[in-house]
C-alpha cells in the first residue's frame, strides 16, 4: 500500500484527477476494480475467440507467404489475450475463473467474432476492418487509467497496425484482381462492414458503462466518437482500392467534414451479444473442446514449475 495520510478514496481520486495511472497495489474503489475486470477479461476473451474465424483459413491460405503471415497474426492475437489475462489477474481474479465465465456465457467477447469467415477475402476484411476498428479503440486505451491495461495496449497497438495492413493488402490485391476476386472482396466488405461498426458498442445514449468509465478515465472517447473516427478513415481507404461501402445513405457532410451513415441494426447486435449470432455456439464449443484437450499441457507446465519451487 502506498504511504498516504489521506483516506484511500481521496488517494484514488487525486491520482485520477492528475491523470496518473492506478497501479495494482494502489487503493481503488471496488466498483472500479470490478469494472476493469469485466472490460479487460472481455477484451482478452475477444482476442482468444477472435483466433477462430481466421484459424479456419490457415490450411487454405493461397500461398506460403500468405500462410506464414496469417499464422504470425493469429499467434499475435493469442499473445494479446495472454497479456490481457495477466493484466486482469493483477486485479485479483484468477485465469481459471475468467475462462469459466467465458465458457458459461457469463462474460462476453466481441460481437464481431460470431460471424463466419466464408472466403479468403474475409481474412482481408477481418484484418482491414476488425483489426482497423480495434486499433481505433485501443489507441485510446493506451491512455486508460489502469497501468497494467494501458501498458498492455501499447504493445498490442504496435502489432495491430501490422495486422490491419496485412488485411488491407489482401483486399487491395483482390480488388485489383480478376472480376471474381473483386466480387469476393466486395462481398466480404458487404458482410463485415456493419459488424465492424458494432464493435464500438451501443450508441452513447444506450451505453450503460460509459458514464463511470469517463469519470475514472478508463475510456477517454465515447463509443460513437470512435465509431465516427473509424468510418471517416475507412471510407477513404475503400475508395483508394475501388471498393464500395455497402451503405446507400453514406454521404460526406461538408459542414462537419464527417461521413454520415445509415442507422445500424441494434436488435441484431443485442441478439448476437446475448448468444444468438450465427456462430456463438460453435465458438464456445470449440473453446471448451480445445481447452479440455489442452489440460495435459497445463498439468505438465504446473508440474515442471513445481520442480523448482
Ligand atoms: N461485443 O456500456 P457499454 C481484436 C456490451 S479483439 C460484445 O458501451 P463499455 C482481434 C458491454 O460489454 C479486440 N459486447 O460497455 C482479435 C456491455 O455489456 P455488459 C476487441 C459488447 O464496456 C482477433 C453492454 O454491451 N476489442 O482486435 O463501456 C482477430 C453495454 O455496452 C460490445 C475490445 O475488446 C461488443 N462489440 O464499452 C482480429 C475492446 N459492445 O459487460 C482482431 C475493449 C458493448 O454490461 N472493450 N458490449 O454485460 C471496450 O473498449 C469496451 O468494453 C467496449 C464497450 C467499447 C466494447
Image (tube, rainbow, N blue to C red):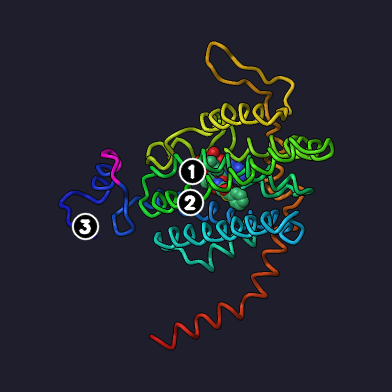
Quadrant of residue 178 in the image?
top right
Ligand 1 position by quadrant? top right
Give the residue at the far right of this rendering.
Answer: 180
Quadrant where the image shows the N terminus:
bottom left
Decide: marks 2, 1 in contact (CB < 8 A)? yes
Q: Is residue 11 magenta?
A: no
Region in magenta: 16-20
Q: Nearer the viewer, mark 2 or mark 1?
A: 2
Query: Residue 142's spot in the image, x, y percent?
Result: 41, 44
Q: Quadrant of residue 89?
A: bottom left
**Which residue: 56% across, 77% down?**
298
Q: Which residue is mark 3?
A: 2
Residue at (73, 47) in percent of width and height: 115
* Image vertical order of residue 261 relative to residue 8, above or below: above
Q: Would you call the spot at circle 2 few (<14 residues within 10 Å), some (14-19), or many (20 or more)?
A: many
Residue shown at 44% from the left, 49% from the top: 153
Ligand 1 closer than 8 Å to label 1 CB:
yes
Query: Can residue 49 be seen by looking at this rendering?
Result: no
Q: Which residue is mark 2?
A: 156
* Mark 2 or 3, nearer chain start: 3
Outermost residue toward the top in this view: 255
Amino acid at each position: 500500500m502506498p504511504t498516504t495520510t489521506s483516506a484511500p478514496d481521496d488517494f484514488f481520486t487525486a491520482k485520477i484527477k492528475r491523470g496518473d495511472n492506478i497501479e495494482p497495489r494502489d487503493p481503488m474503489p471496488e466498483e472500479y476494480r470490478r469494472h476493469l475486470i469485466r472490460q479487460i477479461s472481455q477484451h482478452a476473451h475477444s482476442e482468444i475467440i477472435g483466433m477462430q474465424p481466421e484459424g479456419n483459413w490457415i490450411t487454405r491460405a493461397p500461398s506460403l507467404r500468405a500462410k506464414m503471415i496469417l499464422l504470425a497474426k493469429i499467434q499475435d492475437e493469442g499473445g494479446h489475450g495472454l497479456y490481457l489475462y495477466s493484466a486482469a489477474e493483477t486485479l485479483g481474479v484468477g485465469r481459471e475463473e475468467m475462462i469459466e465465465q467465458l465458457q458459461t456465457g457469463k462474460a462476453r467477447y466481441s460481437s464481431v467474432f460470431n460471424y463466419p469467415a466464408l472466403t479468403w477475402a474475409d481474412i482481408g476484411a477481418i484484418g482491414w476492418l476488425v483489426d482497423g476498428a480495434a486499433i481505433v479503440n485501443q489507441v485510446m486505451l493506451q491512455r486508460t487509467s489502469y497501468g497494467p491495461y494501458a501498458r498492455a495496449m501499447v504493445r498490442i497497438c504496435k502489432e495491430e497496425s501490422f495486422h490491419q495492413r496485412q488485411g488491407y493488402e489482401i483486399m487491395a490485391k483482390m480488388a485489383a484482381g480478376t472480376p471474381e476476386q473483386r466480387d469476393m472482396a466486395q462481398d466480404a466488405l458487404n458482410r463485415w462492414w456493419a459488424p465492424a461498426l458494432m464493435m464500438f458498442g451501443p450508441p452513447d445514449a444506450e451505453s450503460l458503462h460509459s458514464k463511470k468509465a469517463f469519470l475514472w478515465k478508463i475510456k477517454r472517447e465515447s463509443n460513437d466518437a470512435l465509431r465516427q473516427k473509424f468510418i471517416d478513415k475507412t471510407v477513404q481507404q475503400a475508395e483508394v482500392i475501388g471498393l464500395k461501402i455497402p451503405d446507400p445513405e453514406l454521404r460526406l457532410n461538408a459542414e462537419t467534414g464527417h461521413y454520415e451513415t445509415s442507422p445500424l441494426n441494434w436488435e441484431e447486435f443485442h441478439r448476437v451479444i446475448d448468444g444468438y449470432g450465427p456462430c456463438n455456439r460453435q465458438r464456445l464449443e470449440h473453446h471448451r473442446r480445445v481447452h479440455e484437450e489442452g489440460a495435459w499441457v497445463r498439468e505438465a507446465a504446473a508440474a515442471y514449475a513445481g520442480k523448482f519451487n
